[in-house]
Image: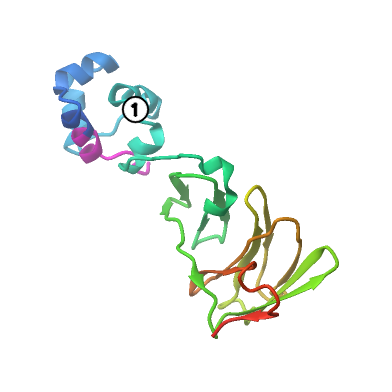
Amino acid sequence: MNQYVTGTVIKELREKNKMTQRALADKLGVSDKTVSKWETGKGYPDITLLEPIAGAFRVSVTELISGNPVHNKNVSANMLRSKYYVCPVCGNVVHSMGEAVIYCHGILLTPMEAEPADARHMIFIERAEDEYYVRIDHSMTKDHFIYFIAAVSADNLQLMKLYPEGNAEARFKIRGVRKIYFCCNRDGLFSIDVVKNAGNNKAGN
């Protein structure tokens, strides 16, 4: 079984809350020896104990698993703050509106950081009535391709999953679209601010 919470995190949270191993054990209905095993990596808590452990430390299960504090202030109200994850094994694309701990194929996925579109990842955007036609000047071979293209507004996400040997293009409804994101399997996530580049039909240096 994959390790879903580390003994180090449990120990740090316990000490932060000024709790002894016995005090934590009493809250969870286990022995202090069991807590000691968790903290020394000789065993892991049953998955059914994740919520009780998180509750004992007054953190979310997400924070417990990741070991990092999570602050979701107004995140759900703004899709522009979304995070994107791609599994390097199967190509699964995951979108999150806030902080999340996401595993796929046993791998802990980290949110990608978007970079501005560049000369090697040129994006062309054309307006056709109420749609944006988006095309990426990029190869679509089995080894080098675009995973997805997404059009994002403050309250909406339109995402088109792409596949090797297909076309690196998509059409999106214009309503409120502020940014276009696209992801290369080798070079990661890129973005363009549609508003700032209004009037131009391509982006990249």
Percent position of residue 38, x then y: 22, 32
Left or right: residue 35 compared with residue 73? left
Percent position of residue 29, x then y: 27, 14
Percent position of residue 25, x then y: 22, 18
The residue closer to the viewer here, 110 or 80, is: 80
Q: Residue at x 39, y 30 (%)?
A: 47
Rendered view: 23 above or below 197: above
Left or right: residue 148 compared with residue 85? right
The residue closer to the viewer here, 44 or 159, is: 159
The residue closer to the viewer here, 149 or 36, is: 149
For label 1, the residue is 54
Q: Residue at x 16, y 23 (%)?
A: 19
Q: Residue at x 43, y 44 (%)?
A: 101
> Residue 117 sits in which quadrant?
bottom right
Coloring scheme of the render?
rainbow
Q: Residue at x 28, y 17 (%)?
A: 28
Residue 189 sits inside the magenta stretch: no
Query: How many numbered marks does the figure carry?
Result: 1
The residue closer to the viewer here, 107 or 156, is: 156
Give, as a three-letter code, the residue at label 1. Ala
Q: Quadrant of the N terminus?
A: top left
Magenta stretch? Answer: 1-12
> Residue 52 sits in which quadrant?
top left
Q: Secondary structure at mark 1?
A: helix
Percent position of residue 196, x then y: 61, 70
Q: Quadrant of the C terminus?
A: bottom right
Q: Residues within 10 Å of mark 1 (few under 14, many from 20)?
A: some
> Residue 76 sits in which quadrant?
top right
Left or right: residue 155 compared with residue 82? right
